[in-house]
Image (cartoon, helix red, strand yellow):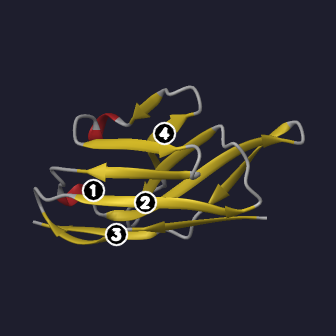
Amino acid sequence: QVQVVESGGGLVQAGGSLRLSCAASGRLFNFVVMGWYRQAPGKERELVATANNLGNKAYVDSVKGRFTISRDNAKRTVSLQMSSLKSEDTAVYYCKMTAWFGGTFNDYWGQGTQVTVSS
């Protein structure tokens, strides 16, 4: 089993910064992809940023230039540095780690951490 735990959410004023962290424990794989998703009230969960094991990173357009994803393969952690936060960034942020084994991709989700940006 793999456990994924996020931390670092909270309340911040618009224009401020927050850093989210995520760590995997239990059965530890070399995760192919680590990523952050978010879900705002009444909306579907959306991809925010991903980082794969080849060093490639991708961001949703709305956070480009403001958010930075980074991963530590040895520690099996991924973080999301969020700057210039806007009220529309308010959401529950989820970490997902994807491992390849058994001939398929396996996704492991955290429980989510709330980020609230006050305007």
Residue 25: horizontal and vertical position, in percent? 66, 64
Answer with mark 1 or mark 3, whichever residue precedes in sequence: 3
Q: Earlier in the sequence, mark 3 or mark 2?
A: 3
Q: As drawn, is 1 to the left or to the right of 112?
A: right
In the drawing, does residue 67 fall left or right of residue 59? Answer: left
Residue 49: image quadrant is top left
Numbered label tally:
4
Determine the CA span between mark 2 and mark 1.
17 Å
Q: Label 2, on which residue?
A: 21
Q: Secondary structure at mark 1?
A: helix
Q: CA distance from mark 1 to mark 3?
A: 12 Å
Front residue (pair 89, 5) = 5
Q: Earlier in the sequence, mark 2 or mark 1?
A: 2
Q: Earlier in the sequence, mark 2 or mark 4?
A: 2
Q: Could you say whether the residue bearing mark 4 is in a helix, strand or loop? A: strand
Residue 52 % position (x, y): 56, 33
Q: Please give the label number shown on residue 50.
A: 4
Q: Which residue is mark 1?
A: 89
